[in-house]
Image (tube, rainbow, N blue to C red):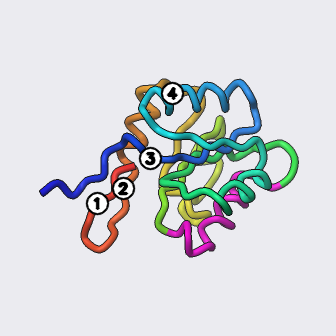
């Protein structure tokens, strides 16, 4: 019996304030046969997740105005609906400069710029144990 949920047919939330970066991430993910919902701001992301179930999240850290990616991640992680959902920080910042990303609820980190292969590899690493079963993003 296979206890892995395949990468395909997952819905991912992408939060990225730079339109060209957001479109590029969306393109990469759709090529991997995933559904993508995207937001330019943290506030927009919070509205989207109220009405849409997601399997994982890719959050930019520096979102310009409003709530930043770290605060968004922390806020989402406190919501019981999202506590077991993989959440990846996608940013130009060096991981060491950001400090303890896990403390904000992040399960992964991807530094810009990155390739489609790096994105796919990272998504395949994002796993959660749930009642003895493995969920692969």
Q: Is residue 54 magenta?
A: no
Could you tell me how far apart the alpha carbons at marks 2 and 1 are, in whole angstroms? 6 Å
Q: CA distance from mark 3 to mark 1?
A: 15 Å
C-beta proximity under 8 Å, tags 4 and 2: no
Please determine whether, in this image, residue 20 is positioned above or below residue 135.
Answer: above
| Residue that carries the numbered disc 2 in the rendered image | 127
* Closer to viewer: mark 2 or mark 3: 3
Give residue 118's quadrant in the image. Answer: top left
Q: Which of the labelled discs sits on residue 134, or is there none?
A: 1
Q: Quadrant of residue 17?
A: top right
- Give the labeled residue for mark 4: 28
What is the x, y in percent for residue 107? 48, 56
Q: Which mark is residue 10?
A: 3
Q: What residue range appears in magenta?
A: 67-83
Disc 4: CA contacts within 10 A as few (<14), some (14-19) or many (>=20): some
First in residue order: circle 2 vs circle 1: 2
Picture residue at 69% right of the left edge, 47% below the top:
61
Residue depth check, mark 4 versus mark 3: number of the one nearer the observer: 3
| Residue pictured at 17% horizontal, 54% vertical | 2
């Amino acid at each position: 019996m296979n206890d892995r949920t395949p990468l395909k047919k997952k819905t991912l939330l992408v939060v990225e304030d730079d339109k060209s970066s957001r479109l590029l991430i969306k393109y990469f993910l759709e090529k991997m046969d995933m559904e993508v919902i995207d937001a330019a701001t943290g506030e927009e992301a919070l509205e989207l997740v109220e009405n849409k179930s997601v399997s994982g999240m890719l959050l930019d850290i520096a979102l310009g105005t409003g709530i930043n990616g770290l605060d968004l991640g922390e806020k989402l992680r406190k919501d019981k609906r999202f506590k077991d959902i993989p959440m990846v920080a996608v940013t130009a910042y060096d991981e060491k400069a950001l400090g303890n990303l896990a403390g904000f609820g992040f399960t992964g980190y991807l530094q810009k710029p990155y390739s489609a292969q790096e994105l796919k590899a990272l998504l395949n690493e994002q796993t959660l144990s749930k009642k003895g079963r493995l969920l692969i993003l």
